[in-house]
Amino acid sequence: MPEFGTNNVLFVSTMHNSVYAFDADANSPAGPFWHVNLGPSVPAALLYGPDADIYPEVGILSTGAIDLARGVLYVVSDVLVQGAPVFFLHALDLTNGQERLNGPVVIRATVAGAGSESLAGAIAFDPMQHLQRPALLLANGAVYIAFGSHGDQPPWHGWLMSYDASDLTRQIGVFNTTPNGDAGSIWQSGRGPAADSQGNIYVITGNGDYDGRDQFRPELPQACRSGPACGRFVYLGGLAIAVRQ
């Protein structure tokens, strides 16, 4: 924080799409070092109808990731754009909250498949049907973002996407858990994907279609073995077969 000197900082994100930076050593801080709002949040009723398990709005639900080397905080916001939800990936400067690294970018993805919501052999990511609950993961020079469903309202899939941590305009990997079926959310109770020392990424999928080949529920898919340039995902079978919803 140039105008405040060197500080321990607590970063807080909210469902109203606000991000704050507070003095972590102050018992009663007078105010934040900085505050930004990333756009109008999405009314829960638009996503859930009368049976909302998140209320009254959906904004920044997941825990962001801090990149000290680049000096940014990555967060995903759910923003109401022309009456519909749109997910954005941001890289906010740790010192002032300003957008960096060519952000924000709209989160989009398409995979080949004949599963739910497929059209002409392809499935497009549908922000209306998905929730970005798991924490973000920074690994392999990439930011990993996982999605599950809104209260199991069909149709939905589990999605895992990765973006170049130095240039948010570069999407470098997309994985759909059930490209020829339905469901298979990645929730993880809000915990983020895990990474090992070889660069493998692990997520746990929830209830959905399963065939052991390209439909994974509840299992432990392994993603992105080959580092930041990878554009494909692979499956490591059976390690989480005891994990059930």
Image: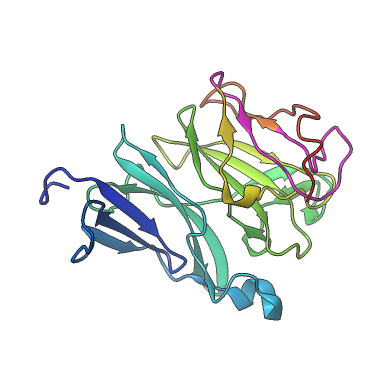
Residue at the spot x=49%, y=64% of the render? Answer: 59
125 left or right of 165? Answer: right
Q: Position of residue 66 (x, y in %)?
A: 38, 41
Count of numbered circles in the view: 0
Q: Nearer the viewer, residue 87 or 13?
A: 13
Q: Nearer the viewer, residue 2 or 7?
A: 7
183 left or right of 170? Answer: right
Residue 103 magenta: no
When the figure is inspected, residue 21 is found, relative to residue 18, above or below; the finding is above
93 left or right of 7? Answer: right
Residue at the spot x=15%, y=42% of the render? Answer: 6
Q: Position of residue 9 (x, y in %)?
A: 26, 49
Residue at the spot x=44%, y=71% of the render? Answer: 40
Q: Position of residue 114 (x, y in %)?
A: 84, 47
Residue at the spot x=78%, y=52% of the render? Answer: 183
The majority secondary structure of the magenta stretch comes to loop
Q: Nearer the viewer, residue 178 or 83?
A: 178
Q: Which residues are magenta?
A: 197-221
175 left or right of 144? Answer: right
**Name of the residue lying farthest toward the front:** 27
Residue 213 magenta: yes
Q: Position of residue 219 (x, y in %)?
A: 77, 38
Q: Nearer the viewer, residue 225 or 105?
A: 225
